Amino acid sequence: MKFKLTSIAAAIILSPATFAADMEDIERLTVKGKYLSVNQSNSIKSPTPIIDVPQSLSIITAEEITARGITSVGQIIDYTPGVNTSQGEGHRDSVVFRGVRSTADFYLDGNRDDVQYYRALYNVEQVEILRGPNALLFGRGGTGGILNRVSKKAKTSEKFVNYNLSANTFGAYNLQLDTNVDTGDKSALRINAMYESLDNHRDFFYGDRYGFNPTARFELSDDTIVDVSYEYIDHERFIDRGVPTANGEPVEAFEEIVFGDPDNNYQTLGADVFRANVEHTFSDNLKGNFNAFYGDYDKVYSNFYAADYNAETEQVTLDGYVDTTQRENMILSSNLVGEFETGSIKHTVIFGGEVINTKSNQDRYNPVFDTRVDDPDKSNDREVFDISRPLAFRGLTGTTSAGLTTTAVFSDVNDDTHVDLDVYSFYVQDEIALSDNFDVVLGARFDSFDIEVFNVKADETRSRKDEEVSPRAGLVYKPQENISIYASYSESFLPRSGEQYANINGDANALDPDTFTNQEIGIKWDFNESMSFTAAIFENEQTSLDNDPNDPESFVEVDSDVSGFELQLQGYITDKWYITANYSNLDGENASGVELRELPENTMSVWTTYEVNEVFGFGIGATYQDESKVSTSASSPVLPSYTRVDASAYYTLSDKMRLQLNVENLTDTLYFPNAHSTHQVTVGAPINARLSLIGSF
């Protein structure tokens, strides 16, 4: 077993770039960051101080998101240890958790949020990123980690109106409103709303996003609280899958060329999401939580992209498809948290269950180019074009490299599947305080995953049922109150077609789920109420079955291994000077000894802010990513290493209004942060600035 050092983000302390706060406010906010309480429906589910959680965990609050000018999940990932971004084909959040790429391990108030889209942050109280397998609390998936958004809730006995108006140098702008109304002694209504007009450095890019999220809280008694919420989501954006590679790296000369169709590269998403949560205190030692979640999603994804590139002839081969998804997620979950003693031993026990029903219909249509119908040596869903800016292809019609006029029609059915999924789960975990200095965490979860897929094209129905038990164990030793040393072991699994559900064709319905194990040792040290250091070492192992290339009737194990370490220092050096610094070292390969894709060996980031006086402050930071491979193959192209420098400044106009400037890529570096495949490499944004007016009434 190969161990190195890794980290956990512990206490979250707000950046001085927020409104000026006195020391009492800073102490209050520090405590809020250290303790994850049940009534926030967060990812830990028990009232356990972060310093006592035997797992790598990072949190960023809404205040810090605003202060840094963050508008996307990807920007949070850039400054988080142990994780990095993937391209997501230009239409979805995609995170690499310790070498495991995922588009489905996203959660909202602990509920699975697995539809592929870019998540907005306007209604988020905080974002929590857990690393290592997390099946005990979240079920299938979570194989390298999970990202949980904690939503803003209505607040009784409070009245406020907050706003954020911003625009950047690309021409994009954003409007956000957060208002809370006290509707009585025991009830409140809160409305979060946003509109964002999208633009960036790439040709043809456009888009807009709407979000409307009213929430209500009812305190039925001193012991019972009900929160209800509805969110309307309407997103549209241009799809850009980047540039080709040659000689083992991205072609820098193509940085301004979009390899797609300006009229038919787009994504639309419409969704209605309902949530209800009931929290009841049975006694001082027993609390319960019941949650209902329903989401109805309708998504269209259309795109053309570079499937191949000929450097000698300067020609590109375009491929594409249009993909639709209609999904309904119904999730019912509940848990009880009890605290009791057996003799001198203290217990905090979580017992919970979850029922999920997902209905998902998805289809994909490939293009047919009329110039390729009679060519037996070429696929008629691809065509070759000379490279120019722009390409000679628009509105499904263009001029090929052979000088022929071509028209594409999305008429080739690639797949059409209807899915019905039922999941039943229950779990139990006991946090055992054997003494003031020594805790043990033991738990396990049972999941029943039953999927049925009707393949319309093949007129065939297939099904598979998996039942898995996922254990978790941890030890925490505290030589003193502000230091914890921990060791943990956890497991997770991912059934075939367990992420996006579309395919259990071929032998997939005969294969067992992929399994993941994580072993981790770490230390968390709060120097004082304003500064913390965290570190840990870990190893993640994945085991999956695949067809034996030498015997089609047999299967072989395909293993991969990722080990590494993370470090983080975070907090206030002085009352006015804040810093967060992260470093990660990752090493991963498959059973053949080939390095895993999108796994930079070294990543590091630093962000620091300084409050010059009561009205003015500034910040500067940098994020570094080592080179990484585009694919898991010996001949894979490489994404070059890069360093991006960011900066910010703010000026307080009044006690209720702040002017803020955030600059990304201050040195105007050309960089390529991620990729989807060999000829689809993302071009990082050049220097750009965002000016924001932030205030309240």
Image (cartoon, rainbow, N blue to C red):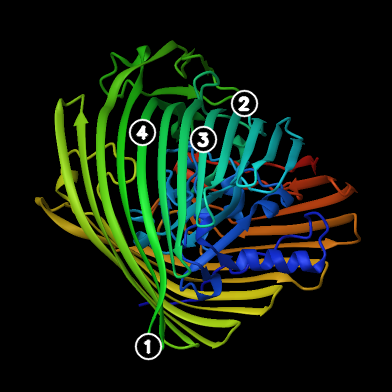
In the rendered view of the protein, which quadrant contains the N terminus? bottom left
In the image, is residue 646 above or below residue 537? above
User: Looking at the image, do the residues carrying marks 4 and 2 touch, with CB atoms under 8 Å apart?
Assistant: no
Task: Select label 4 or label 3 by which is in front.
Answer: 3
Judged by depth in the image, the label closer to the viewer, 1 or 3, is 1
Q: Looking at the image, is mark 4 or mark 2 earlier in the sequence?
A: 2
Closest to the camera, between mark 3 and mark 2, is: 3
User: Which of the numbered marks, if any, corresponds to residue 230?
Assistant: 3
Q: Residue at x 81, y 73 (%)?
A: 574
Mark identifier at residue 328: 4
- Residue type at tag 1: Gly
Q: Which mark is residue 206?
A: 2
Amino acid marked by disc 3: Tyr
Q: Secondary structure at mark 1?
A: loop
Q: Amino acid at mark 4?
A: Glu
Whichever of callouts 2 and 1 sits on the residue coming sooner in the sequence is: 2
Q: Position of residue 451 (x, y in %)?
A: 22, 42
